[in-house]
Structure formats: C-alpha cells, structure tokens
C-alpha cells in the first residue's frame, strides 16, 4: 500500500522499522562470525610479521618488538615495512592508507556504503606489515575497516538500499572491534556515536546482533575476557577523588588537543614534500626506527605495555618515555599515511598520562589513574564519550570505574568540543572536502502537523487537488511526511485534504515547511526570563496577605 505521491504508507509511531530488519539481522549474524575469524587471522598475521621482521623466524606466537636484539639495525625495520605499505597503496589501493575509521566514514557518507573488493584483502595485509615492522599502531582500525568492507561486499550481492548497505557495513565494523577487544557494548556505542549518523532500530538491531555474535564467537576462538585484568579499585573515591577525575579529564582533553594538532601538522608537513606520497610512509618509518632505538617499548601495538600500566608496574621514568616517544612517532607515522589503528595507541598514551598523574593525585589503587585517563583520552580524542566509559569497563571488567571514568571522560569531551572544531577522525574527512555533523536531534518537521502551518485562506477545489498529480497532504500528517512526498513528486506545494471528509482544507508550500525550522531556531537562540525575582517576592507577599 502506498501513500499519495508513491511512497510506502506508514502510520506515525516512535520508529520507522519494517520487517526487513529481520533480513539485515540475519546477514549481520553471519557477519559477526566472519569478523571474529578475521580478527583472529589479523592478529596471527601481525604476529607472523613481527617475528619475521624482528626475530627472523616464522611463527604465529605473540612477540614484542621491544625484545629485539637488532641494535641500530632496528631503524631499518620500520623503513622497509613502511616502504612495502607505500608500494601496496600506490599499485593496489590508495584507500589502505590511514587508520581505517575515517575511510569507513567516507564510504558511508560519500560512496553509498560501497567498498572495493580488493580493500578487504589489502587493508589487513598492509596493517599487519605496518604494525609487524614496528609501527606504533593498533589492529582495531584495520579490522574495523576490514569487517566493514566484508559487510559492504555481502550487501552488494543482495538487493538492498544504500541505507541498508550502510547498516551492514557498520555491523561488520562493530563486529570487528567487538572480536578484537571483547567489548561488544562499546563496539555498538562506537557505531552509534561515530559511524551510523542515526539512531534507528533498522540500524541498531543488526549492528548489535553482529557485535554480540562476534563477541560470542571470540570466546571459542580466543578465550574469555577481560583483555586487561586490573586490581580491585574502590567503589567510593570521595570528593578529592572526584576532583582528581576532573583534573585527569582536563589533562586528557589537553593531550587530545595536542595529539590531534600534531597528527595533522605532520600530515601538512608531508604534503609539502616534493616527492610522491608513496615514499612518505618510508620517511615516517625512519622516525619510528629512531624512536624504537631510543625507547623500544614504543614499537608495535603494545598490549603488554598497556597491561603493565594498568597493573602499576611501570617506573615513572619509563612512563614519561612511553608518553613522549610513543606520541611523537605515532603522530609522525600517522601523518605519513601508513596503515594502522588509533585505539591501542590512545590507550597507551592515556595510560602513560595517568601513570604520571598518579604521583600527584590521590592514591586509589594500582592502575586507577591510568585506567581513568585511558577512558578520558578516548572520549576527548575520538569525541565518543559513551564509548570511552564503556570501553574502559569492558576492557577490565572493573564496574567501580564507571563513575570516575564518566567524570573524566565528560570533562575531556567538553574540553575538545570547545577547542577543536573536529576530531582526529572527522578532520581527515573534512580535509577531503566533505562535512559531517555529529549532533543528533529530533527533526522539528516530525512533530509539527500540516494543520499548524498550512494556508487555509485559499482552499482549492477537490477537482484541482486531484489534478495535481494525485499528490496531496492530509491536515493531520506531519511535515516530515509531506516534505518527503513533495520531493518524491517534484512539487513545491500540495493541496491539503481533511482526512474524515475528504474535502480540501488548504495549501501547504515549501515556505510553510520552513516554519518548523523557524521554531527550532527560536528554541535555540531566543532567550527569555520566564520568572523574575520580583515575581517571586510578589507571590510571597500575596501568600502573606491571604
């Protein structure tokens, strides 16, 4: 059944989901299993590359680049790896460059959620080479992009709309993150806060199912979480503890600001080089190699370093080295356009910041401030506050961290919102000439009815109304329905009929539809005092007189 103008009929309600959500959920369930295997394979591939580059052996066993015995030759390792990545980007796909999430955003916003098939193969391989040769990145960005690529590819084989393809792309991305970190809820929140650009059951249900399926499959492939166990932290931290969380949030916000600026200052510097971009990662590899020679713990993913920071087992001299060296080589390497993720490096840098703060903030247990600062740095740098809080919870299973993390994350988020126009993720999209907004609100056109804005002084005849391409509006419909109908019928005005009598009631035009926007602008910018102090005194006086 269709409404006037050819669009499907749907009664007004809280949501607009249709039974097609079951098809998307079924595909998403399969995506969850696929992404879990992809995560395991990518980690194994990183281990293989790490063993080959640093220890000259073929093995899938976990290996830390910090344990190498190459001496000064370690500088050459990331240069070679980055050169391979540059060649893969030049002759394979340029879209393997970067940390994955901005590329996923671009595919959603610009390319109709279509991802090239070769990206599903080249992205994980390039990331494994980059990280395995010492690149200071995480595996989560590439697996997010890889999972999203598989979601998009599967969607392109099914008769789906662009919006439905977007849902499956994001479902694959969320499943990849869920399988990598064993954080199913944080993965869904990241999808909502950063990738979906909407809050609808049509998209939320498949994404949540994909994430949950990936987390369940991970338990059979890898094992149970948490990824980073921590000592028990106090459930009550007192007022000084909360003040410390505010301080940690401000420090994380400031560090988020500096990191974002550093990454794009590095990118701008590489843009001015008189050589092809294919060679930029190799130049960034020199910085990685020098940093690795000075401070080997800064190389690679660094999950072992993150775990040590959360246990409070890292001396403060090493903590300072982690913060300075890791952030420096990370910003330079990321600006060079190599392949790798940002979540794990942010966790390490946030943990190092918290390790330094432990010297001046209240002693609330080993690893408390590193964990709080990890959450805050995610909320500040990625502008995803809910993800930051829940991510810290799921990584450690420390329920007592929720309140401290919420305070610190909110402060850090507020700091960067006021000091940076865009996040480290959306800035790259903006630099490619596109704009996106991450503020979600109810469209005023969805809550205003035609009868509130229509022109009733000129009532067309019923014959004229039906002559207008059989497209018309009912007086009890919302403006959102009408504007969609106008767009579908290529009209700028519609006759309005009374639903009960079927008689003409007026005309609604595009200028009438703007009244909904006017109401929104007034609500945002018109300031007025509803009550005044004299009014309160007058009310008190009246009560006394009575």
Image (spheres, rainbow, N blue to C red):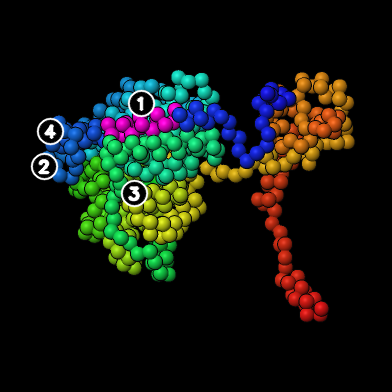
Q: Is residue 22 magenta?
A: no
Earlier in the chain: of badge 3 and badge 1, it is: 1
**How busy is the neighbourhood of tag 3: few (under 14 within 10 Å), some, or many (20 plus)?**
some
Q: Does residue 247 appear anywhere in the picture?
A: no
Q: Which numbered circle lies on residue 56?
A: 4
Percent of width and height locating residue 456: 86, 36
What SS does tag 4 mark?
loop
The local secondary structure at tag 2 comes to loop
Q: Is residue 37 part of the magenta span, yes or no?
A: yes
Dot 1 surroundings within 10 Å: few (below 14), some, or many (20 or more)?
A: many
Q: Give the extent of the magenta segment.
A: 27-42
- Point out the frontmost of discs 4 and 2: 4
Nearest-to-viewer mark from 3 and 1: 3
- Left or right: 79 in relation to 397: left
Name the side, left or right, on which 155 lies relative to 509. Answer: left
Q: CA distance from mark 3 to mark 2?
A: 32 Å
Looking at the picture, does residue 33 appear above or below residue 411?
above
Rendered view: 386 above or below 246? above
The residue drawn where x is 36% and y is 31% is 33
State if disc 2 and disc 4 touch (CB < 8 Å).
Answer: no
From the image, tell me which residue sits under label 2: 69
* Alpha carbon distance from label 4 to label 2: 11 Å
Kindly identify the residue that appears in the image at 19 percent across and 39 percent down.
Answer: 62
For the N terminus, which image quadrant? top right
**Is residue 198 shown left or right of residue 122?**
right
| Discs 3/2, front | 3
Label located before the other in sequence (4 or 1): 4
CA gap, disc 4 and disc 3: 32 Å
């Amino acid at each position: 059944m269709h409404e006037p103008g050819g669009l499907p009929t749907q009664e007004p309600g809280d949501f607009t989901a249709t039974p097609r959500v079951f098809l998307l959920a079924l595909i998403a369930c399969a995506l969850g299993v696929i992404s879990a295997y992809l995560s395991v394979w990518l980690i194994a591939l990183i281990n293989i590359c790490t063993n080959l580059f640093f220890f000259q052996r073929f093995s899938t066993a976990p290996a830390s680049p910090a344990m190498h015995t190459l001496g000064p030759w370690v500088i050459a390792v990331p240069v070679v790896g980055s050169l391979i990545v540059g060649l893969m980007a030049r002759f394979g796909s340029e879209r393997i460059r970067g940390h994955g999430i901005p590329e996923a955003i671009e595919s959603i916003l610009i390319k109709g959620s279509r991802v090239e098939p070769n990206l599903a193969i080249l992205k994980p391989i390039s990331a494994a080479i980059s990280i395995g040769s010492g690149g200071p990145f995480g595996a989560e960005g590439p697996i997010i992009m890889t999972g999203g690529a598989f979601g998009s590819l599967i969607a392109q084989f099914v008769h789906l709309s662009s919006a439905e393809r977007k849902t499956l792309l994001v479902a694959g991305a969320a499943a990849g993150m869920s399988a990598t970190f064993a954080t199913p809820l944080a993965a869904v929140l990241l999808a909502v806060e950063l990738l979906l650009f909407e809050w609808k059951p049509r998209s939320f249900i498949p994404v949540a199912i994909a994430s949950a399926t990936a987390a369940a499959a991970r338990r059979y492939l890898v094992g149970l979480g948490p990824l980073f166990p921590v000592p028990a932290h106090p459930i009550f931290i007192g007022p000084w503890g909360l003040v410390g969380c505010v301080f940690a949030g401000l420090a994380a916000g400031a560090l988020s600001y500096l990191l974002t600026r550093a990454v794009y200052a590095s990118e701008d510097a590489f843009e001015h080089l008189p050589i092809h971009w294919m060679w930029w990662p190799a130049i960034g590899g020199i910085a990685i190699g020098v940093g690795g020679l000075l401070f080997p713990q800064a190389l690679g993913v660094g999950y072992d370093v993150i775990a040590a920071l959360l246990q409070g087992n890292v001396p403060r001299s090493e903590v300072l080295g982690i913060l300075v060296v890791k952030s420096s080589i990370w910003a330079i390497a990321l600006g060079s356009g190599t392949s790798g993720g940002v979540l794990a490096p942010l966790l390490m840098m946030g943990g190092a910041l918290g390790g330094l703060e432990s010297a001046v903030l209240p002693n609330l247990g080993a690893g408390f401030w590193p964990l709080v600062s990890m959450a805050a740095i995610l909320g500040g740098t990625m502008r995803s506050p809910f993800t930051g809080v829940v991510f810290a919870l799921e990584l450690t299973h420390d329920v007592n961290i929720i309140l401290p993390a919420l305070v610190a994350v909110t402060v850090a988020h507020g700091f960067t919102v006021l000091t940076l126009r865009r996040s480290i993720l959306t800035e790259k999209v903006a630099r490619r000439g596109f704009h996106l907004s991450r503020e979600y609100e109810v469209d005023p056109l969805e809550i205003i009815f035609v009868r509130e804005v229509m022109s009733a002084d000129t009532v067309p005849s019923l014959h004229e109304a039906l002559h207008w391409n059989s497209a018309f509006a009912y007086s009890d419909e919302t403006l959102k329905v009408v504007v969609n109908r106008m767009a579908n019928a290529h009209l700028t005005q519609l006759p309005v009929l009374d639903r009960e009598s079927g008689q003409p009631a007026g005309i609604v035009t595009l200028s009438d539809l703007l009244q909904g926007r006017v109401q929104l602008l007034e609500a945002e910018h018109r300031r007025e005092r509803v009550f005044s102090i004299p009014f309160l005194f007058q009310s008190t006086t009246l009560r006394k007189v009575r």
